[in-house]
Image: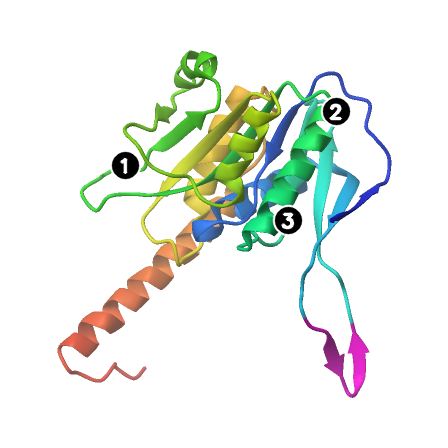
Amino acid sequence: MLGVKIHSYPKLESPNMLAALPDMGNVAGIGLSYLIKKLNAKLFAEIYAYWPPFVSYKNGVVDYTQSTYKFHYLGDENLLIFNGDFNPTDPRRLYELCYEVVRMAGRMNVKRLYSIGAALRPASATEPKVFGAVNNEQLLEDVRNHGVVMLEGEGQITGFNGLILGIAKEQGVDAVCILGEIDNPGVIQPKAAQNILKLIINMLNIKPFNMDELDEEEKRKQFMEQQMGYLERVMERGEPPGIA
Protein backbone atom coordinates (compact mmCIF):
# COMPACT_ATOMS: atom_id res chain seq x y z
CA MET A 1 0.00 0.00 0.00
CA LEU A 2 1.40 3.40 -0.99
CA GLY A 3 1.38 6.26 1.46
CA VAL A 4 -0.42 9.39 0.27
CA LYS A 5 -0.15 12.79 1.93
CA ILE A 6 -2.56 15.55 0.91
CA HIS A 7 -1.38 19.04 1.82
CA SER A 8 -4.48 20.78 0.44
CA TYR A 9 -6.74 20.21 -2.54
CA PRO A 10 -6.53 23.02 -5.11
CA LYS A 11 -9.81 24.58 -6.20
CA LEU A 12 -9.85 23.82 -9.91
CA GLU A 13 -12.75 23.14 -12.25
CA SER A 14 -12.37 19.98 -14.39
CA PRO A 15 -8.61 20.44 -14.90
CA ASN A 16 -6.35 18.59 -17.29
CA MET A 17 -3.58 16.48 -15.79
CA LEU A 18 -0.02 15.90 -17.00
CA ALA A 19 1.36 12.69 -15.48
CA ALA A 20 4.71 11.15 -16.43
CA LEU A 21 7.90 9.68 -15.00
CA PRO A 22 11.52 9.57 -16.26
CA ASP A 23 11.98 7.34 -19.29
CA MET A 24 14.40 6.92 -22.21
CA GLY A 25 16.60 9.98 -22.47
CA ASN A 26 14.76 11.35 -19.42
CA VAL A 27 12.41 13.16 -21.80
CA ALA A 28 9.46 13.14 -19.40
CA GLY A 29 11.62 14.01 -16.40
CA ILE A 30 13.19 16.99 -18.14
CA GLY A 31 9.90 18.22 -19.61
CA LEU A 32 7.75 18.16 -16.48
CA SER A 33 10.48 19.42 -14.16
CA TYR A 34 11.09 22.35 -16.48
CA LEU A 35 7.37 23.14 -16.69
CA ILE A 36 7.00 23.04 -12.90
CA LYS A 37 10.03 25.29 -12.46
CA LYS A 38 9.20 27.87 -15.13
CA LEU A 39 5.55 28.31 -14.19
CA ASN A 40 6.13 28.02 -10.44
CA ALA A 41 3.66 25.17 -9.94
CA LYS A 42 2.46 24.61 -6.37
CA LEU A 43 2.81 21.30 -4.51
CA PHE A 44 -0.46 19.92 -3.11
CA ALA A 45 0.05 16.18 -2.54
CA GLU A 46 2.70 13.45 -2.39
CA ILE A 47 2.89 9.68 -2.73
CA TYR A 48 5.62 8.11 -0.59
CA ALA A 49 7.70 5.58 -2.50
CA TYR A 50 9.63 2.44 -1.55
CA TRP A 51 12.91 4.07 -2.52
CA PRO A 52 15.81 4.22 -1.95
CA PRO A 53 16.51 0.75 -0.48
CA PHE A 54 19.45 2.08 1.54
CA VAL A 55 20.61 4.84 3.86
CA SER A 56 23.55 7.20 3.40
CA TYR A 57 26.16 8.02 6.00
CA LYS A 58 28.79 10.68 6.51
CA ASN A 59 31.49 10.33 9.13
CA GLY A 60 29.55 7.57 10.83
CA VAL A 61 26.21 9.43 10.97
CA VAL A 62 23.33 7.95 8.99
CA ASP A 63 20.95 10.07 6.92
CA TYR A 64 17.72 8.85 5.34
CA THR A 65 15.38 10.62 2.96
CA GLN A 66 12.45 8.72 1.51
CA SER A 67 11.66 9.55 -2.10
CA THR A 68 8.23 10.80 -3.03
CA TYR A 69 6.15 11.33 -6.13
CA LYS A 70 4.59 14.76 -6.25
CA PHE A 71 1.36 16.38 -7.42
CA HIS A 72 1.57 20.07 -8.39
CA TYR A 73 -1.03 22.44 -9.78
CA LEU A 74 -1.19 25.58 -11.91
CA GLY A 75 -4.27 27.62 -11.07
CA ASP A 76 -4.28 29.95 -14.07
CA GLU A 77 -3.80 27.05 -16.48
CA ASN A 78 -6.31 24.80 -14.66
CA LEU A 79 -3.69 22.06 -14.75
CA LEU A 80 -2.42 19.28 -12.46
CA ILE A 81 1.09 17.85 -12.84
CA PHE A 82 2.32 14.52 -11.48
CA ASN A 83 6.02 13.61 -11.59
CA GLY A 84 8.74 11.82 -9.66
CA ASP A 85 12.34 10.70 -9.67
CA PHE A 86 12.03 7.12 -10.92
CA ASN A 87 9.83 4.83 -12.98
CA PRO A 88 9.12 1.57 -11.10
CA THR A 89 10.27 -1.63 -12.79
CA ASP A 90 8.38 -3.91 -10.40
CA PRO A 91 4.96 -4.56 -12.01
CA ARG A 92 3.05 -4.51 -8.73
CA ARG A 93 4.51 -1.16 -7.67
CA LEU A 94 3.88 0.23 -11.15
CA TYR A 95 0.21 -0.77 -11.09
CA GLU A 96 -0.27 0.56 -7.56
CA LEU A 97 1.21 3.89 -8.56
CA CYS A 98 -0.89 4.18 -11.73
CA TYR A 99 -4.08 3.40 -9.82
CA GLU A 100 -3.21 6.01 -7.18
CA VAL A 101 -2.66 8.69 -9.83
CA VAL A 102 -5.91 7.84 -11.60
CA ARG A 103 -7.73 7.93 -8.26
CA MET A 104 -6.39 11.45 -7.78
CA ALA A 105 -7.63 12.31 -11.27
CA GLY A 106 -11.07 11.08 -10.22
CA ARG A 107 -11.07 13.10 -7.00
CA MET A 108 -10.15 16.24 -8.95
CA ASN A 109 -12.68 15.54 -11.72
CA VAL A 110 -9.93 15.61 -14.36
CA LYS A 111 -11.18 16.24 -17.88
CA ARG A 112 -8.27 14.61 -19.69
CA LEU A 113 -5.00 13.01 -18.62
CA TYR A 114 -1.80 13.41 -20.65
CA SER A 115 1.42 11.42 -20.37
CA ILE A 116 4.64 12.24 -22.21
CA GLY A 117 7.73 10.24 -23.08
CA ALA A 118 10.20 9.15 -25.72
CA ALA A 119 10.10 7.10 -28.92
CA LEU A 120 13.22 5.84 -30.69
CA ARG A 121 13.84 7.49 -34.06
CA PRO A 122 14.81 5.21 -36.97
CA ALA A 123 18.29 5.80 -38.37
CA SER A 124 16.75 6.69 -41.74
CA ALA A 125 14.61 9.51 -40.28
CA THR A 126 15.59 13.14 -40.70
CA GLU A 127 13.62 15.58 -38.53
CA PRO A 128 12.35 14.23 -35.20
CA LYS A 129 8.58 13.84 -34.98
CA VAL A 130 6.12 13.88 -32.10
CA PHE A 131 3.91 10.80 -31.97
CA GLY A 132 0.77 10.11 -30.01
CA ALA A 133 -1.73 7.50 -28.86
CA VAL A 134 -5.11 7.81 -27.16
CA ASN A 135 -7.27 5.56 -25.00
CA ASN A 136 -10.49 6.76 -26.62
CA GLU A 137 -10.97 6.73 -30.38
CA GLN A 138 -13.01 9.96 -30.17
CA LEU A 139 -9.82 11.83 -29.19
CA LEU A 140 -7.96 10.98 -32.40
CA GLU A 141 -9.07 13.93 -34.52
CA ASP A 142 -8.43 16.52 -31.81
CA VAL A 143 -4.90 15.21 -31.17
CA ARG A 144 -4.08 15.01 -34.89
CA ASN A 145 -5.22 18.62 -35.35
CA HIS A 146 -2.39 19.72 -33.06
CA GLY A 147 0.25 18.21 -35.33
CA VAL A 148 0.73 14.91 -33.55
CA VAL A 149 1.50 11.86 -35.73
CA MET A 150 -0.57 8.97 -34.41
CA LEU A 151 1.23 5.67 -33.83
CA GLU A 152 0.48 3.18 -36.61
CA GLY A 153 0.39 -0.61 -36.63
CA GLU A 154 0.83 -2.53 -33.38
CA GLY A 155 3.28 -2.12 -30.52
CA GLN A 156 3.71 -1.35 -26.83
CA ILE A 157 4.23 1.75 -24.71
CA THR A 158 6.04 0.46 -21.65
CA GLY A 159 6.37 1.74 -18.10
CA PHE A 160 4.26 4.27 -16.26
CA ASN A 161 3.89 6.64 -19.23
CA GLY A 162 2.10 3.94 -21.23
CA LEU A 163 0.32 1.91 -18.54
CA ILE A 164 -1.34 5.01 -17.10
CA LEU A 165 -3.42 5.27 -20.29
CA GLY A 166 -4.75 1.75 -19.83
CA ILE A 167 -5.61 2.26 -16.14
CA ALA A 168 -7.26 5.58 -17.02
CA LYS A 169 -9.34 3.86 -19.72
CA GLU A 170 -10.42 1.18 -17.25
CA GLN A 171 -11.55 3.92 -14.85
CA GLY A 172 -13.35 5.98 -17.51
CA VAL A 173 -10.78 8.80 -17.81
CA ASP A 174 -9.82 10.05 -21.29
CA ALA A 175 -6.05 10.01 -21.78
CA VAL A 176 -3.43 10.92 -24.39
CA CYS A 177 0.23 9.91 -24.66
CA ILE A 178 2.66 12.26 -26.45
CA LEU A 179 6.04 10.81 -27.47
CA GLY A 180 9.02 12.78 -28.76
CA GLU A 181 11.48 11.00 -31.05
CA ILE A 182 15.04 10.53 -29.77
CA ASP A 183 18.17 9.03 -31.33
CA ASN A 184 19.92 7.69 -28.22
CA PRO A 185 18.06 6.37 -25.15
CA GLY A 186 21.21 6.45 -23.02
CA VAL A 187 21.75 10.22 -23.35
CA ILE A 188 19.53 12.97 -21.95
CA GLN A 189 17.32 14.44 -24.67
CA PRO A 190 16.40 18.08 -23.94
CA LYS A 191 15.37 18.77 -27.54
CA ALA A 192 12.73 16.04 -27.49
CA ALA A 193 11.42 17.42 -24.19
CA GLN A 194 11.29 20.89 -25.73
CA ASN A 195 9.40 19.62 -28.80
CA ILE A 196 6.78 18.05 -26.55
CA LEU A 197 6.47 21.14 -24.35
CA LYS A 198 5.87 23.36 -27.38
CA LEU A 199 3.05 21.08 -28.45
CA ILE A 200 1.59 20.76 -24.93
CA ILE A 201 1.57 24.56 -24.55
CA ASN A 202 -0.64 24.76 -27.61
CA MET A 203 -2.87 21.82 -26.72
CA LEU A 204 -3.57 22.93 -23.15
CA ASN A 205 -3.55 26.71 -23.65
CA ILE A 206 -0.58 27.20 -21.31
CA LYS A 207 1.05 30.61 -21.37
CA PRO A 208 4.36 30.42 -23.33
CA PHE A 209 7.58 30.51 -21.32
CA ASN A 210 11.30 30.85 -22.04
CA MET A 211 13.06 27.64 -23.11
CA ASP A 212 16.59 29.01 -23.56
CA GLU A 213 17.92 26.65 -20.87
CA LEU A 214 16.78 23.65 -22.90
CA ASP A 215 18.49 25.09 -25.98
CA GLU A 216 21.73 25.44 -24.03
CA GLU A 217 21.40 21.91 -22.66
CA GLU A 218 20.93 20.60 -26.21
CA LYS A 219 24.10 22.40 -27.34
CA ARG A 220 26.07 20.79 -24.51
CA LYS A 221 24.66 17.38 -25.44
CA GLN A 222 25.66 17.82 -29.09
CA PHE A 223 29.16 18.95 -28.12
CA MET A 224 29.65 15.90 -25.91
CA GLU A 225 28.38 13.61 -28.67
CA GLN A 226 30.84 15.18 -31.12
CA GLN A 227 33.69 14.64 -28.69
CA MET A 228 32.71 11.02 -28.11
CA GLY A 229 32.39 10.46 -31.84
CA TYR A 230 35.87 11.87 -32.39
CA LEU A 231 37.38 9.62 -29.72
CA GLU A 232 35.65 6.56 -31.16
CA ARG A 233 37.03 7.30 -34.64
CA VAL A 234 40.53 7.80 -33.25
CA MET A 235 40.40 4.52 -31.32
CA GLU A 236 39.11 2.67 -34.38
CA ARG A 237 42.22 3.82 -36.27
CA GLY A 238 44.36 2.60 -33.41
CA GLU A 239 45.75 6.05 -32.66
CA PRO A 240 46.12 7.53 -29.18
CA PRO A 241 44.05 10.70 -28.52
CA GLY A 242 45.90 13.96 -29.03
CA ILE A 243 47.27 15.78 -26.01
CA ALA A 244 46.56 19.51 -25.69
Please check the rendered image and state whether residue 43 is part of the magenta-colored stretch, yes or no. no
The CA distance from mark 2 to mark 3 is 19 Å
Give the camera-side residue of 214 and 116.
116
What residue is shown with label 3? 84
Which sits earlier in the primary sequence, circle 2 or circle 3? 3
Count neighbours of disc 2 (C-alpha within 10 A) and say few if under 14, some if 14 to 19, many if 20 or more. some
**Whole-percent x and y of residue 220?**
42, 57
Kind of residue indicated by mark 3: Gly
The CA distance from mark 2 to mark 1 is 38 Å
Position above or below: 227 against 120: below
Position above or below: 63 against 168: below
Give the camera-side residue of 169 and 82.
169
Kind of residue indicated by mark 2: Met
**Whole-percent x and y of residue 53?**
67, 68
Kind of residue indicated by mark 1: Glu
> What are the residue bounds of the magenta stretch?
54-63
Give the camera-side residue of 95 and 201.
95
Is residue 89 shown left or right of residue 24? right
**Whole-percent x and y of residue 166?**
52, 31
What residue is shown with label 2? 108
